[in-house]
Amino acid sequence: MYCIPSTCVYNPVMASKIKSAAIPDEVKRTAMRNAVKNIPFINCGGFSITIVNANCNTYQKPASSGWHTHPFYEFSLVRRGVVGYRTKQKDNRRGPGEVHFMYPDCQHCWDIVKTPVAIDNFEIEFHAIDPAYAAFVRNMPDLVRRKGFTLTLPNDIQRLYSSIDDELIRNDALTSHRIPLIIYDIFHGMIRQNFPEWIRAEAHVSGNSDRAFRLFLVAKSIIDENIQNDIAPGEIARRLSITQRYLNELFGKIVQQPCGRYIKEHKLNRAYSMIVSDPTGKIREVAYALGYTDPLYFTRVFTEHFGISPTAVREHPQV
């Protein structure tokens, strides 16, 4: 676990200024997205998580959403105000310093209970480093339901929330380097606090598993770097100097699907995130940005995968 630099320790004086400090939502959103790009894989010993994206939402007026789903795990940090989250199984309210954890494809809606509200939403991918931990990844939705979509965080981790705002206000040359460390520790602390039975005291991963995971990381990096291109599994295998069969085997162990299917779903999930984060954007621009040369084909594939069209996703505001 990374150490937080002394400059990032919770500062009560600075925290008191946050209430009156007006951080433009777009400035915060841009800073957080850039910070998330610098977050390494968070190794929890046997499995890991990757932070894919971050959206920052600020509301001064009452707002709400209709029932909807997300194709990814969503980790919502409420830092100001109160938000009501409803699922088919449970109704919850989240206040400052509290977390709402949503698993993929869970139907939910939300409404603003007390303003002003500030929420940081993180999209997460879970990976099984060790085959023995694949069960944890597969069973995560059930674990989230059993916990009532509520995760607890130690007090020292909660205090890091204010450090994020401190950094956004400070906005010096090291801000983009310190924020990833803060977010890294928040997530590492969240996992250790809520799923201790799945954390090894000392991570022990066999040499073969460790090599497979390192190859997976490189393959995923190649996919992310070529998100605008139609890169094929065969090309990825060639760059890694392995066979395509072995590439599919290691993807099957870590994300429970072959490389080609992962690329397709990864692109579509990215498209979903882009549409949600920029409802005024054009669907064809999202398609082009992800390597789809035919927007109509993109719309058909998107609709078949999610059961809802890109336009319908854009027209329903979501957190």
Image (tube, rainbow, N blue to C red):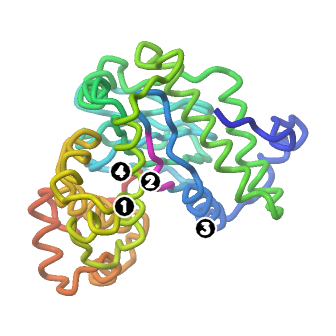
Number of the label disc, if any, that sits on residue 303: none
Identified at 32% across, 26% down, the residue is: 133
Span colored in magenta: 49-54
Q: Residues within 10 Å of mark 1 (few under 14, many from 20)?
A: many
Numbered circle sitting on residue 216: 4
Q: Amino acid at mark 2?
A: Val
Label 2 – label 3 distance at C-alpha? 19 Å
Location of residue 71 in the rendering, given as x and y in whole percent from the top left corner: 27, 50
Q: Secondary structure at mark 2?
A: strand
Q: Is residue 194 left or right of residue 263?
A: right
Tag 4–tag 2 contact (CB < 8 Å): no
Q: Main secondary structure of the magenta part?
A: strand
What residue is pinned by disc 3?
Answer: 26
Looking at the rendered structure, which numbered label has been put on residue 273?
A: 1
Given this view, does label 1 or label 4 mark the residue nearer the observer?
4
Q: Earlier in the sequence, mark 3 or mark 4?
A: 3
Q: Amino acid at mark 4?
A: Phe
Q: Earlier in the sequence, mark 2 or mark 1?
A: 2
- Residue 52, numbered label: 2
Does 117 lie within the magenta span? no
Please check the rendered image and state whether residue 53 is part of the magenta-colored stretch, yes or no. yes
